[in-house]
Image: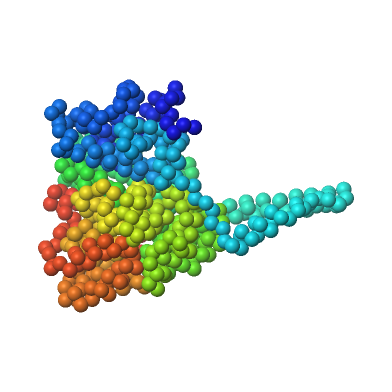
């Protein structure tokens, strides 16, 4: 197949369809200049057979004036470079719609279509399987052996006996499988019950709000690691949990959201009230999303409720996954449990997560022994196992981002981090860890303000974070220079006491935030402690430099209260633990 599909009659339809898919990506929806540029290039590619110039792109595509001087302004080149990175980022997170990617050759400005391995070889190189010496020897010996004739020499009566034995075995196996499937626990179904009153829309001016909220909530449930989405909250049989979101007016006629989650028996698992301030719609949406994140996290309200369920089968890969994530969030070693889950559930959808956890543990053990982060290690092989099973897996991409950042390859790290941020909306600790790594390594094109907003929203929605999230939130807020919020997070009480290295780091960072002499005397030790979790040296320097500053005026953890944003949360699931 030629590199470009421009000669095919259906090129225009394919190009138009693929560009529309890219334009609908949330990352580009927040970048109007990039959307305009991509649309302009698509239009010119299809309608103008001549070559595109930088001047045409600047004036016709980007709205620069006719007297624009290319020699004194690099704006179009910067935007083209950014568009190439955005296309690379898009395909690192999404498969092409019909098997062909939109790309732009270096030195050109026209859009082209090509298979993924041609358009973006850095993303789609085929990984060769890694065979041990023993495996190679076995394969070589097998290739030299003569094939056995399995049925040679059997009489008819013997053949009948063999077939009868096979039939009996298959019958027993089928019964065993049916019995196991009847006991096995699958992901709980979660339904949504969303209502937006006329009064809410009138007071806020947010018309057509309901479809956007429904779409966003569906996205959160669908991407959850621990739940499946039930499209109708009144399905028969009913879903295991229902998240109700009632956008209305409170007793004071002020607009707010009442968000609850109940199980099938009607028992309240979680309750939250978020007050809406019309001029602060984006902050309001951030708070809604952050609450959904807590509900659907592998260490959040739903997960803890499932673990507490006395009827929860101990024989499933789902329970294995939850026990690993909750144990890790509390600072408990899960290395042996990961190995047991990998050995026991050979066909589980969670195997990419477990391989990534195994690789993380292997890298961490090496760091404690002074071994640098490298790719020719057992840890890297475990990570490749995870990526081969699911190249978009959030855990595996988080670890890949950490490895690349530690090795100083920030552009590559940004690609992996972007995948994580798109796919870990329901896992606060993973979000916090990735935000810390990405912000320290350049941030994938996001501004400091954007990182700060996302991190603070995560902190506001988790006023009593688990130990792992608390530690990452402290480090993330320090990485973006927000010492005030870091102090308030440090002063919050976690649900459970931290254990192991997490406890040591949390105590050291918390004390350093309030005790400058202590920090100055122990800076090198704290650096070594943080290095267990933050492998990027530049990231650690940001955190240590912020800790080294004189105590500053605290930034409110709830900065929107003065603007009318109010959050009150109660969670029986939290208070019972």
Does residue 154 appear to the left or right of 475 in the view shown?
right
Q: Is residue 345 above or below residue 370?
A: above
Q: Position of residue 349 (x, y in %)?
A: 50, 52
Q: Position of residue 334 (x, y in %)?
A: 45, 67
The quadrant holding residue 506 is bottom left
Q: Is residue 202 above or below residue 320?
A: above
Position in image of residue 157 (x %, y %) = 87, 50
The residue that appears at 16% across and 51% down in the rendered structure is 560
* Residue 230 to residue 300: above or below: above
Residue placed most toward the observer, 93 or 285 = 93
Would you say residue 118 is visible in this rendering?
yes
Judged left or right of residue 277, residue 474 is right
Residue at 76%, 53% (x, y): give it.
Answer: 146
Q: Nearer the viewer, residue 444 or 216?
A: 444
Seen at 25% across and 30% down, the residue is 53
Instruction: Provide residue 339's location: percent of width, then percent of height.
Output: 51, 65
Residue 198 in view in this figure: no
Q: Residue at x 21, y 30 (%)?
A: 55
Which quadrant does the C terminus fall into? Answer: bottom left
């Amino acid at each position: 197949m030629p590199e470009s599909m421009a000669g095919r009659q259906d090129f225009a339809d394919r190009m138009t369809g693929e560009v529309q898919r890219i334009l609908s990506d949330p990352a580009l929806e927040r970048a109007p200049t990039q959307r305009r540029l991509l649309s302009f290039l698509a239009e010119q590619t299809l309608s103008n057979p001549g070559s595109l110039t930088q001047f045409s792109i600047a004036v016709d595509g980007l709205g620069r004036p006719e007297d624009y001087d290319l020699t004194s302004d690099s704006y179009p080149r910067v935007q083209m470079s950014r568009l190439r990175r955005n296309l690379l980022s898009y395909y690192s997170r999404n498969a092409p719609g019909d098997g062909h990617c939109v790309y732009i050759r270096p030195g050109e400005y026209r859009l082209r279509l090509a298979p993924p391995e041609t358009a973006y070889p850095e993303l789609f190189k085929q990984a060769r399987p890694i065979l041990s010496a023993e495996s190679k020897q076995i394969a070589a010996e097998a290739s030299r052996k003569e094939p056995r004739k399995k049925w040679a020499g059997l009489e008819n009566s013997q053949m009948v006996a063999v077939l009868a034995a096979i039939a009996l075995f298959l019958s027993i196996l089928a019964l065993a499988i049916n019995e196991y499937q009847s006991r096995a626990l699958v992901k709980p179904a979660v339904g949504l019950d969303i209502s937006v009153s006329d009064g809410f829309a009138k007071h806020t001016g947010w018309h057509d709000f309901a479809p956007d909220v429904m779409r966003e909530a569906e996205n959160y449930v669908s991407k959850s690691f621990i739940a499946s989405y039930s499209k109708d909250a009144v399905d028969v049989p009913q879903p295991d949990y229902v998240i109700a979101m009632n956008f209305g007016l409170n007793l004071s006629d002020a607009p707010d959201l009442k968000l609850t989650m109940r199980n099938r028996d009607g028992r309240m698992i979680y309750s939250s009230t978020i007050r809406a301030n019309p001029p602060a719609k984006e902050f309001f949406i951030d708070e809604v999303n952050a609450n959904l994140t807590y509900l659907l996290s592998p260490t959040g309200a739903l997960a803890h409720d499932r673990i507490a369920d006395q009827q929860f089968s101990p024989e499933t890969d789902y329970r294995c996954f939850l026990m690993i994530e909750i144990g890790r969030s509390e600072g408990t070693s899960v290395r042996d449990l990961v190995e047991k889950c990998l050995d026991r559930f050979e066909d589980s959808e969670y195997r990419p997560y477990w391989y990534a956890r195994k690789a993380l543990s292997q890298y961490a053990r090496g760091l404690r022994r002074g071994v640098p982060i490298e790719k020719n290690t057992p840890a890297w092989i475990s990570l490749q196992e995870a990526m081969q099973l699911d190249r978009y897996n959030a855990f595996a991409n988080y670890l890949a981002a950490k490895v690349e950042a530690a090795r100083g390859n920030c552009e590559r790290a940004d690609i992996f981090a972007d995948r994580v941020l798109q796919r870990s909306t329901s896992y606060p600790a993973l979000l916090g860890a990735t935000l810390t790594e990405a912000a320290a390594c350049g941030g994938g094109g996001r501004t400091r303000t954007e990182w700060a907003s996302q991190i603070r929203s995560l902190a506001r929605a988790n006023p009593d974070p688990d130990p792992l999230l608390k530690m990452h939130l402290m480090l993330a807020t320090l990485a973006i220079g927000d010492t005030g919020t870091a102090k308030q997070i440090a002063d919050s009480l976690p649900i459970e006491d931290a254990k192991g290295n997490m406890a040591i780091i949390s105590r050291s960072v918390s004390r350093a935030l309030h005790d400058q002499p202590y920090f100055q005397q122990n800076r090198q030790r704290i650096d070594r402690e943080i290095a267990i979790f933050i492998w990027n040296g530049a990231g650690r320097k940001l955190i240590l430099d912020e800790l080294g500053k004189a105590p500053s005026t605290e930034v409110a953890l709830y900065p929107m209260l003065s603007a009318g944003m109010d959050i009150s949360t109660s969670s029986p699931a939290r208070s019972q633990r």
